[in-house]
Amino acid sequence: MESEEKMEQMNPELKKLAETARRAGAIDPGFYQKYNVKQGLRESNGNGVLTGLTEISDVSGHRVENGENVPIEGELYYQGYKIDELVKGFKNRRFNFEEITYLLLFGDLPNRQELRDFVKVLDEYRELPSKFVRDVIMKKPSANIMNALQKSVLTLYSYDEDPDDTSVEGLLRQSLTLIGVMPLFSVYAYHAYQHYNNGKSLIIRYPDPELSTAENILHMLREDGAFTELEASVLDTCLVLHAEHGGGNNSTFTTHVVSSTGTDTYSAVAASLGSLKGPRHGGANLKVQHMFEDIKEHIPNWSDEDAIRDYLLAILRREALDGKGLIYGMGHAIYTLSDPRAVILRNCAENLSEAKGLQEEFHLYETVERISAGLLMENRRLSKPVCCNVDFYSGFVYSMLGIPEQLYTPIFAIARISGWCAHRLEELVNKGKIIRPAYQYIGHHRTYRPIGDRQ
């Protein structure tokens, strides 16, 4: 509907060209089957096509028995450690995201002294060049903070004395710089846009060297800089859960693809940010939030399961929400019975909802999750179970933390930069070939005609 309205408002000549481009770009779907093309780099069974090796992370949603895939509770490993065991091991400690960043980059969990030293090193890199905030972040601030992040990351190239250094030492220096400043880029870009475009007070608070990454985000974001221990702990857990997810997710694969050319760190990370911005990747939690706003608008009684079921059916039948027939936050390319990140986030959401007095809303999320899983199996005639993914609860958690929607995907980026940098190091240390998949040409070979001879 929105695209049709845009077409109506479009310049007539541009509209004509757009229609020509649409016809020129359309490919007969039958060709994909004819040439056995792995659309989305997926096999016919939905599994990803193997394109590389990694030791950084592993994900699994099934095991093979007698040659068949059997669904299992989802498993996510960071450098061989299960994510739920890592999170259980935190036990209310601070600097857990920093600990996981160390693990991803260096392959082992740090001891106490190594973690203290690493936190100190990160703090030294959590500083922007002189006048960077004024000259870069505040200059024509973007409504989409992800684009502001790309601009800031690319501009750092100009401040680096050796930006094209691809030695391990150079890569590590650049990685720690980006991990350190990404929270500043995100929060400052948000405040700048709110000030210049929405007339809000401009708040630029420096990070506190005594605080963790999660604590500093809340400290810099909030007008009074205050936060509770629970709030910081929950955000810290969110960062840990979003830090890495195997080499095959779109943004991390982008890191590998671009890094394989030998380009600089800033260009590679900017490309990954562009991937993460997409609503089918990092922006998915916003879709979930908007879906729940729509559900609450149409169902005033959140305990009426029949009404919830009927409305979810209407969504699946393209009769409600945005007409796309999707229940956002449900389903995953790999996980079947459960997404381990969503399981942990559900627990975080429950604890936070109790502290905020939002238990009723949390129960609505649980109800939608439970009913949706059954409806999707019934209506889509799926051969494997459907579970909610990490995006289902993350937006709700962010909203309870008072994080504005414009920062939902940037928070994802603040976390995932650790995984991207680990994969970039892995790609360049192993000096793999430039990544170049093949595309089948299905057009026609034609004879050139001078412009005067064309109709």
Image (cartoon, grey):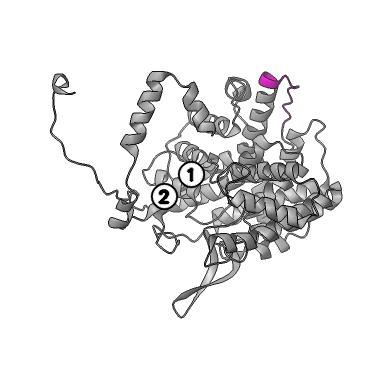
In the foreground, 294 or 41: 294
In the foreground, 60 or 30: 30
Q: Name the disc covering residue 428, or none.
A: 2
Task: Judge whether 13 appears above or below 428 on screen.
Answer: above
Residue 152 image point, x, y percent: 55, 30
In the foreground, 138 or 387: 387
Q: Residue 200: say if magenta.
A: yes
Q: Name the disc covering residue 171, or none.
A: 1
Residue 207 image point, x, y percent: 72, 35
Which image quarter holds the N terminus? top right
What segment is highlighted magenta in the picture? 195-206
What's under tag 1, amino acid-wise?
Leu
Residue 19 left/right relative to 422: left
Residue displayed at 79% across by 45% down: 300
Residue 127 image point, x, y percent: 64, 33
Residue 204 left/right relative to 128: right
